[in-house]
Amino acid sequence: MEFLVFSDVHYYTNPSKSRLLSDGTYSWLNKQIEITNDICTYAEQHNIKLIIHNGDLFEEKNRINVELYNRIWEFYRQLSKRFDIIFNMGNHDLYSLKDSSLKPFSDIVRLIEEPSSLIIEDYLLHFIPFGQVQSNLPLPKSSCKRNLLFLHEEIAGLKFGSTDHSSSSPINYSLLKEWDWVFNGHIHRPQNFANIINIGSPMIQDWGETGELKRFIHFDNGKINSIDIDCPKFITLSSLSEIDTINDTDYFRIIISPEEADHEIFRLYNVFPNIIKSRKRSQRLKESSSSIEEDIGEYINLKAPETLDKKRLLEIGLSFLK
């Protein structure tokens, strides 16, 4: 039994990080759709018919742009002619416990609205939508040789973003250890922990996810294959002197002073200022200084006005240390 699972695609026009193209579409959404198409191309190349999205199809909950919604619905209607598609529900798919923006998709995909199971080739696939774990985590009675759980939750021990902050969720490994594998959405950072496969999102959303390697999962008869996704990166530059590294694909944030905020580079859709009130001088005391005298001498050369006798100032400073 084989399937592909990805999660947290968060379809969105994202005007603040997009180019508006001549056909009226937004570059951010086009990239999201391109990545989804790449996942489907991989599925076709490997003769995989089942594709699962594990929650958070749209970025917005109850104010989704109609044109965006219709485009994504039609996109999946066409995909449903080639694949069997399952949508689990994430927190962004719900604006109340039972009301979901995904209900119109139920005509073209299998939509998981409540905890439910599916048996395929002696594998049990059990799905729990966001917020409905309650007493549904224990393994159901099953004669299947392998039991797979699909969640969209915080799980204790999983880490967030670049800070390595760990979730302290009451949902922990001890509640999940009976399952052969747990495929989780919600947390965008891809990671594996014991039997927990936190899928991660297919595209970096902002600088809080800088450096994350995005992926989708190919489940191949009990083998977990992590497939890397090539997506735009979010990069921080330390000054305007590095603007020659800027390209048209990735996103850049440049550390600048207020006086530099009107630089023409910030007219680009993918370049943003990170303004700080004061910049430290690039000059620093030499780390290789071998004595206090050298340290003080370097400091005087850096700070003292030219009108002062720097040699005499050094002598006075050293006298206080005796």
Image (spheres, rainbow, N blue to C red):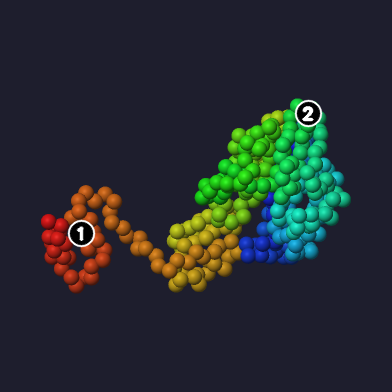
- Residue lying at the far right in this picture: please name it: 107
Quadrant of the rendering where the C terminus is positioned: bottom left
Q: How many marks?
A: 2
Q: Answer left or right for 31 relative to 256.
A: right
Which dot marks residue 282? none
Q: Tell me what residue is drawn at x 55 percent, y 62 percent.
A: 271
Q: Tell me what residue is drawn at x 59 percent, y 56 percent.
A: 206
For the residue marked with disc 1, what is the amino acid?
Gly
Residue 38 screen position, x and y as percent: 71, 45
Pick the residue in front: 1 or 91: 91
Mark 2 sits on what residue? 144
Quadrant of the rendering where the N terminus is positioned: top right
Mark 1 sits on what residue? 297
Give above or below for 89 relative to 278.
above
Q: Tell me what residue is drawn at x 52 percent, y 60 percent.
A: 253
Confirm whether residue 34 shows in the render: no
In which quarter of the view is residue 311 placed?
bottom left
Q: Are marks 2 and 1 in contact (CB under 8 Å)?
A: no
Residue 321 screen position, x and y as percent: 15, 57
Task: Characterize the local packing of mark 2: few (<14), some (14-19) or many (20 or more) Cα atoms within 10 angstroms.
Answer: few
For the residue marked with disc 2, what is the amino acid?
Cys
Q: Is mark 2 on a helix, strand or loop?
A: loop
Confirm whether residue 274 shows in the render: yes
Pick the residue in front: 289 or 193: 193
Q: Answer left or right for 308 relative to 172.
A: left
Residue 10 screen position, x and y as percent: 69, 54
Give above or below for 199 relative to 102.
above
Q: What element carries label 1?
A: helix
Pick the residue in front: 132 or 53: 132
Sooner in the amino-acid sequence: mark 2 or mark 1: 2
Residue 262 screen position, x and y as percent: 50, 72
